[in-house]
Structures are given as structure tokens and as C-alpha cells.
Image (cartoon, rainbow, N blue to C red):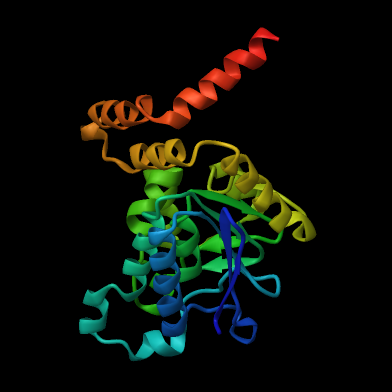
Amino acid sequence: MTLRIEERGDRVTATLDRPEKRNAIDQETIDALHELCAALEATPRTLILTGSAGVFAAGADIAQLRERTAEDARKGINAMAFIRIHELPMPVIAAIDGYALGGGAELAYAADIRIATSSLRIGNPETGLGIIAAAGATWRLPEIVGEARASELLLTGRSLDAEEALQWGLVSSLHPADELLAAAHGIADRIAANDPLATQQTKRALRTPRAQHPAVELELQAELFDSPEKHRRMTAFLERKSR
């Protein structure tokens, strides 16, 4: 098993688990991610992505990449899995320790929230291997850190340390390694305290292209305004306030 799954009622933790390969993402891992996504599409829950043995993922599996052909490139083997993760109904939290390089970085970029440890090294060295970062970096990274910074990272192939990643907004917080997963669960707890449908609608709005705003919010809000949960939560708030 290259992906270790732990389930709770409102969340799933998926741990990349190929420590002998620094959790390099191979075809078996991609297949397991698709299987996980199918389950989370059917039963929406928050997803926490992390890695074993002090590494998130040191990249895609180079031995497999070396053998892939132009036809394989056009299939977008890693890209399609990461798009599916990005589009999951509930939030995805990446808890990143150590290396997140190449495909590992692109998996992290697909998350909604990224937190890390001080040992983080994140970036895309693909051009040094004769390829491009084609599993999301060229369109997601500019959205996260801006076009100028994304261009520098992708064109030079350099990686960021934890402090620089925090300053750039690539990760939102840093934690000691032994507290990283607890911090991720703390975020998941805050998400779980909110209305799941409102959370899903917020994620839909965040993922909708700018040209479709504000119409998209109005339709999503219309659905929520008629929901029993909205009335229940607002009534409870007003009752607490009146005490």
C-alpha cells in the first residue's frame, strides 16, 4: 500500500507511504488517489494529505517518468488525479513535512489549505530533468503566489524553504513536526463545526472563474437561504445572544 488511509466520521487522513522512495508518487499511488477521490465524491468529507517518515513527497517516481512516452504525457496521468483532488466537494488540507518537490509540490498546490514544518523544501525542479511541471504548477502556482514569483520558481527550478514559503503565502502556517498533524486536525475541527453544505458552497464559489461572479454566489446563497440548517443555526445564534 502506497497510500495509508485513516477514517473518522467527518474526515479522512491519507498518508503517502513509500518511505524507501521518499514517498515518490508512482502509478500505484495515483490509482489509490483516484480510489480515494471516488469515495470522497460519494460521501463528502474533509481530506488531510500528509507523508510518512518526515517527507511529504520528493517528486514523481523518476524511474517511471523516464519510461513514459508522448502518449503518456497527453493522458495527464498525475494531472488528472490532482485535478480530481482539487475539485473534491469538501476542503483538502496538505500537512507538509520535509520535501515537497516536483509532483509532490503539485499535489500540495492542489489542496485548499497548506501547512508545513520548518524543514519544508518545496519547488519544481522539472526543467533540470528535461520536462515541465505539467501536473498543475503552471496554472495553480501563479494563482497562489502571483505570476512573477511563480515564473521565478518554475523557470529556475529552485525550491523554497519554510520561511520563504510562509512569506510568499504558499503555506499559511508553520508547526513543529510532532504537532503538524494535530494542527491539521485542528483546522479540520473548525471546518467540521460549520455547516457542511455552506462549506461546500463556499468551495464551489472559490473555484468558480471570475467571469461567473457574482451570479454564482447568488445561486449558491439562494439554496442555502432555504435550507433547514440555516434556520436552525441562525435561531440558535439569536437565542444565545438574547440570554
**Quadrant where the C terminus is found in the figure:** top right
**Residue lying farthest top?**
242
On screen, residue 86 above or below 233: below
* Quarter of the image where one finds residue 178: bottom right
Is residue 102 at all visible to an observer of this figure? no
User: On the rendered structure, is 181 left or right of 188?
Assistant: right
Q: Position of residue 59 (x, y in %)?
A: 50, 74
Q: Residue at x 58, y 50 (%)?
A: 165
Counting from the top left corner in percent of width and height, residue 191 is at 57, 42
Is residue 40 placed above or below 240 in the rendered structure?
below
Residue at x-position 44% and y-position 58%: 43
Residue at 34%, 91% (x, y): give it.
67
Residue 227's quadrant in the figure? top left
Q: Give the position of the N terminus as an image quadrant.
A: bottom right
Considering depth in this image, is 193 or 21 the residue closer to the camera?
A: 193
Please say whether residue 139 is visible from this viewpoint: yes
Q: Position of residue 3 (x, y in %)?
A: 55, 76
- Percent position (x, y) of residue 93? 55, 53
What is the count of numbered marks? 0
Residue 182 is left or right of residue 161, and the answer is right
Camera-side residue of 31 and 119: 31
Q: Is residue 59 left or right of residue 203?
A: right
Given residues 151 and 176, the one toward you in this image is 176
